[in-house]
Image: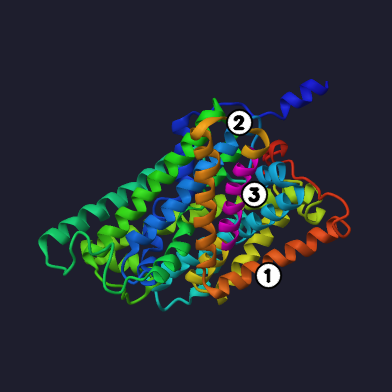
């Protein structure tokens, strides 16, 4: 019976490389390229493509290190928490998981705030808070009753977003070719106002656009040949979005040189009207709202699952592991995340995106370092190639991510540091003054409450 029970708890390997890549693209959300474009342009002093290139460098190195660790820990689903915990000790693993929780817990807030900002710009008579609540309530209700988005819906959503982006790029290039905007093909990458500090600040915020690719490691148990598929999928997803973000930023600055917008939080609508009039702006708005709603729905579900797991394993209060008897969903975590979204009433998009990146960059640094530690402990290869893959590239990733972490806004670093300090205090409580190891989360064996709904 023990063997049978273990088999029941194993996930079926059905995902191929294309399927994993599509899931990664759906999680990151292509239209985020337009959703935050105004903020990146403003922070970079009108050189958004260069800021995205810096971010892409950090993400490529980090995806490489995630891939290295996924190829080693391929037997079951993994995460930054798992990799750091195994390679660098359970306490550092716990704190890495705590920092990741900062992302998972607050990303829905940012998603809803971005969508609300665009609706408020289009309908200024309606207060921003009304739109935030309009996102939170139906999303929370849908996640409680367990309604799921089918895999086919992911394909359709991704296809629609890519179509909108393709039309935007085509119209922008046509506009640039037909009118003298004052820009050259290279001016979006560098201008008189370009500074390293501005680029670093913009790149630190731009990292928000990439968040989601690291979640592919959680699909390890469901993927064919995960040692090869997961690392390849992560690199493909990061490279795809790097090209997409740089390309969208480039054409945006070709038609709109400089960094001035009527409202940076909804700059995509201004750009859409510039190249396609009010009709195309309406299409872009519809795409952004649908994309933000679907993204918020998925992220809230995933974040509540993480809270459920941490509550069940005693890492957080056990009340978080409560499942609604009727729907078999982690209702307390879902409602808690929804309530946290109300903090968006008092924040702007730039600040909210910045402070969750504190958790992302911190976790990315630790994953890169865990790859180096694994090499020194286990020597998975020999020669210059192994040293390059296990030490040089991860070290470069750790350095670039640390630099971007330190380039975040002061408020973001303060909020992130407070969150880390709370994690250390909670770890001390769990371990009775660090005298015993912290509880471990069994992410690879957790039942998926959202999928168990009848």
For the point 59% across and 34% down, which residue is it? 220
Q: Which residues are magenta?
A: 358-374
Q: Give whichever of 243, 292 is nearer the camera.
A: 243
Q: Mostly what secondary structure, the magenta segment? A: helix
Whether the magenta-drawn stretch holds residue 339 is answered as no
Q: Give whichever of 1, 77 is nearer the camera.
A: 77
What residue is shown with label 2?
A: 380
Secondary structure of the residue carrying numbered label 3: helix
Q: Is residue 201 visible?
A: yes
Q: Give whichever of 318, 246 is nearer the camera.
A: 246
What residue is shown with label 1?
A: 418
**Does residue 35 lie above or below 447 as drawn?**
below
Mark carried by residue 145? 3
Q: Give whichever of 283, 223 is nearer the camera.
A: 223
For the point 51% across and 65% down, which residue is it? 353
Q: Quadrant of residue 357?
A: bottom right
Secondary structure of the residue carrying numbered label 1: helix
Secondary structure of the residue carrying numbered label 2: loop
């Amino acid at each position: 019976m023990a063997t049978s029970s273990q088999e029941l708890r194993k996930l079926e390997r059905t995902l191929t490389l294309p399927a994993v890549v599509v899931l990664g693209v759906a999680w990151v959300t292509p239209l985020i390229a337009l959703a935050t474009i105004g903020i990146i342009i403003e922070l970079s002093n009108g050189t958004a493509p260069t800021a995205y290139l810096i971010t892409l460098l950090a993400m490529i190195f980090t995806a490489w290190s995630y891939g290295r660790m996924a190829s080693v820990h391929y037997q079951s689903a993994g995460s930054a928490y798992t990799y750091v915990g195994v390679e660098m000790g359970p306490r550092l693993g716990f704190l890495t998981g705590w920092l990741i929780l900062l992302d998972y817990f607050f990303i829905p807030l940012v998603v809803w705030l971005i969508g609300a900002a665009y609706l408020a710009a289009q309908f200024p008579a309606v207060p921003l808070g009304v739109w935030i609540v309009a996102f939170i309530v139906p999303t929370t209700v849908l996640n409680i009753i367990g309604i799921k988005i089918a895999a086919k819906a992911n394909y359709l959503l991704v296809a629609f977003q890519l179509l909108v982006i393709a039309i935007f790029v085509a119209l922008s290039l046509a506009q640039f070719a037909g009118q003298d905007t004052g820009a050259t093909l290279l001016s979006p990458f560098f201008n008189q106002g370009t500074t390293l500090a501005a680029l670093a600040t913009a790149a630190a915020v731009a990292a928000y656009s990439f968040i989601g690719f690291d979640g592919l490691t959680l699909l390890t148990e469901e993927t064919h040949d995960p040692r090869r598929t997961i690392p390849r999928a992560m690199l493909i997803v990061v490279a795809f979005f790097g090209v997409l973000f740089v390309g969208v930023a480039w054409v945006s600055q070709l038609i709109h040189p400089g960094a001035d917008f009527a409202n940076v939080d909804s700059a995509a609508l201004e750009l859409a009207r510039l190249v396609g009039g009010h009709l195309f702006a309406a299409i872009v708005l519809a795409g952004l709202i649908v994309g933000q709603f679907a993204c918020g729905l998925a992220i809230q579900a995933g974040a509540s699952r993480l809270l459920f797991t941490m509550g069940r394993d005693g890492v957080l209060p056990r009340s978080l592991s409560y499942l609604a008897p009727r729907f078999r969903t982690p209702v307390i975590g879902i409602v808690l995340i929804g309530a946290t979204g109300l903090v968006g009433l008092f924040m702007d998009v730039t600040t909210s995106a910045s402070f969750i990146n504190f958790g992302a960059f911190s976790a990315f640094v630790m994953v890169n370092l865990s790859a180096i530690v694994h090499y020194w402990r286990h020597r998975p290869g020999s020669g210059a190639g192994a040293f390059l893959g296990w030490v040089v590239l991860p070290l470069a990733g750790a350095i670039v991510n640390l630099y971007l972490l330190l380039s975040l806004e002061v408020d973001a670093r303060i909020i992130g540091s407070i969150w880390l300090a709370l994690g250390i205090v909670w770890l001390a409580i769990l371990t009775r003054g660090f005298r015993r190891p912290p509880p471990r989360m069994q992410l690879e064996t957790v039942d998926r409450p959202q999928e168990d709904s009848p």
